[in-house]
Amino acid sequence: MVDASSPAGQSEQGPTVYTFPGKSLLNREEAARYLGITPLRLRLLDIARCGPISLSPGRYRIDALDLYRSELFLKAALPVEEASRRAILAQAKIDSDHFEPDPFMEMATQHDLRDVMAFIGGRVAIIGGLVIVVLSHTPLSRILTHTLK
């Protein structure tokens, strides 16, 4: 991009300095501490694909964690300002040895996991029912009922 104050076609060539923020990538343990949940809960959220978006397996960006926290607060009809306040407080918890779970985040993530498990359980029940219905009208069912008696 050419600056409007420079002559036509000439641009200043010089070193460009980029500033990077502090630690913006967290591993699973640090991300869990930042959210106020256990690393196992964060792993389960990752497996269920209902948690924060990870950059790579076990690596999370702070802005993705903040977005996930804000979404949970919005879903619970709580003010987003509270999520921002908790994010500021969570910065100090990342490197500390003392872990104190956030009651809201524990409850909200548990709700998300239960929703996913109910969805999966419902699908398994439907498929299992269909298999039982199909097998009950075949000769295989007669063989199975006679051998199990």
Image (cartoon, helix red, strand yellow):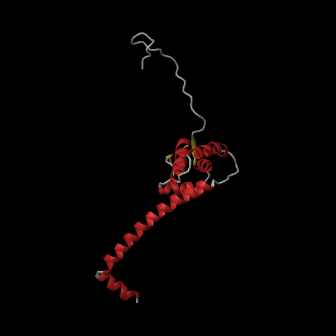
Q: Position of residue 133 (x, y in %)?
A: 33, 77
Q: Image point 54% across, 50% down: which residue?
A: 73
Task: Name the residue rendered at 66%, 46% in the picture.
Answer: 93
Quadrant of the drawing holding the C terminus: bottom left
Instruction: Name the side, left or right, on which 58 lies relative to 135.
Output: right
**Residue 77 x %, y %:** 53, 52
> Count of labels shown?
0
Q: Position of residue 30 (x, y in %)?
A: 61, 47
Please say if 9 is above or below 56: above
Using the rendered image of the protein, determine whether residue 38 is visible from the camera's viewpoint.
Answer: no
Task: From the viewer's side, name the closer residue of 68 and 138.
Answer: 68
Q: Position of residue 16 (x, y in %)?
A: 52, 22
Residue under the image location 44 percent in, 64 percent down: 120
When the figure is inspected, residue 27 is found, relative to residue 140, above or below; the finding is: above
Q: Quadrant of the N terminus?
A: top left
Which is more toward the observer, 95 or 100? 100
Visible residue check, residue 89: yes
Residue at the extreme top of the image, as rendered: 7
Residue 25 or 86: which is nearer the viewer? 86
**Observer-nearest residue: 93 or 87?**
87
The answer to whether residue 142 is above or below residue 45 is below
**Side of 54 relative to 148 (left or right):** right
Q: Residue at x 29, y 80 (%)?
A: 138
